[in-house]
Amino acid sequence: TANRPRILVTRKLPEAVERRAARDYDARLSTDDTALDAAAMGDAAEGCDGVIVCAADKVGADAIDGLPDSVRIIATFSVGTDHIDLGAAKRRGIAVTNTPDVLTDATADIALLLMLAAARRAGEGERMVRAKAWGGWAPTQLLGTHMSGKTVGIVGMGRIGQSLARRARGFDMQIRYYNRTRLAPELELGAIYHDNVEDLLPHAEFLSLHCPLTPQTRHLLDARRIALLPKGAILVNTARGPVVDDRAVVAALKSGQLSAAGLDVYDGEPHVHEGYLGLENVVLLPHLGSATTETREAMGFRALDNLDGWFSTGEPADRVV
Ligand code: 8YV
């Protein structure tokens, strides 16, 4: 099967995904998790027809311009596409696909986990037990915030925002949301729509971010907007780090304007803003949103489905460019 398309896979993927990739493609698999810089990606893709990248790979204009002419498609193993210069891909006539749907529920689970962990001070409690600093149960020890009956504000009511809304309903929370467009009434399920973020914020005792990172959403949550939240609000970010202004969030966690936060994503990750590291009232996870075996396999299969679609009909299902 000498004429199978050649693909480069930049990262180690779940075994079942790599097995299928090797079965259907002349696949150049990665043996580790090291990111390739633009020059290394170009070299590694020599002779390839397509590339599978991850959101932790920086695929800027330099990387795209450095790809050999043979590469016609970039299939990203992520729903987010902010790591790819889509304009540069378009200019070079390279198709780009992502992996929507399959990571929706896993990511909403992590948002809910962070809401609970931040509200109930789970990280602090765990650290106390591990440090052998727990002196025993006490009526006023580590008191957190009740979730039932509270309002969660959701910024970005796409697939993941809607999945979080379904979960929050199970916790008897009120739901309000901001989205560029209002959902169809049958999808809203009682959630209250705000057509701008400023109107949503004063209601959001919990605030969960589910918008993509774009020039418009960079630092969407800045000091001015944090001040619009009710005092003691809880912030959760499973979207992208730069959607919040870290300095403003750290200041609000210190002043009590935010009582707690739960973060899964960071501006400049894997670097984490130093200000968070010394604070007890922030729960820090290492970008685990989609990190279940089931979801990561489904993401890999979805990326391969897109390559299959491209090489068979020229029409991959999840084409974004
Ligand atoms: C991944 C993600 O963990 O899909 C995304 O956009 O951020 C996560 O699912 C990771 O970025 C995969 O490349």
Image (cartoon, grey):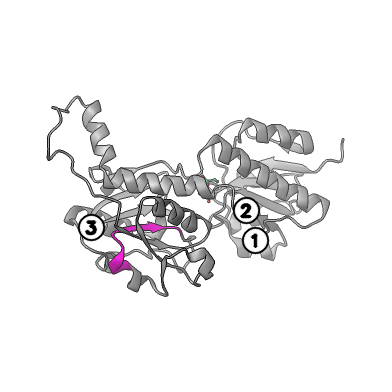
Q: Disc 1 and disc 3: Cα gap in Å?
A: 37 Å
Tell me the kind of residue under disc 1: Val
Q: Secondary structure at mark 3?
A: helix
On the rendered image, what quadrant is the N terminus found in?
A: top right
Residue at point 67%, 52% (across, down): 74
Neighbourhood count class around disc 2 (C-alpha, 10 Å): few under 14, some 14–19, many 20 upward:
many
Label number found at residue 320: 1
Q: Which residues are magenta?
A: 201-210
Ligand 1 has an atom within 8 Å of the beta carbon of the residue at disc 2: yes
Q: Specify the quadrant of the image occupied by residue 113.
A: top left
Is 194 placed above or below 290 here? below
Residue 118 locus on image (x, y percent): 29, 46
Q: Looking at the image, do the residues carrying marks 1 and 2 touch, with CB atoms under 8 Å apart?
A: yes
Residue at point 18%, 40% (across, down): 142
Tell me the kind of residue under disc 2: Asn
Is 199 placed above or below 9 here? below
Residue that sits furthest to the top in the current view: 132
* Residue 200 included in the magenta stretch of the image: no
Q: Secondary structure at mark 2?
A: loop
Residue 216 locus on image (x, y percent): 45, 69
Answer yes or no: is residue 272 visible: no
Q: Looking at the image, do the residues carrying marks 2 and 3 touch, with CB atoms under 8 Å apart?
A: no
Q: Which residue is mark 2?
A: 98
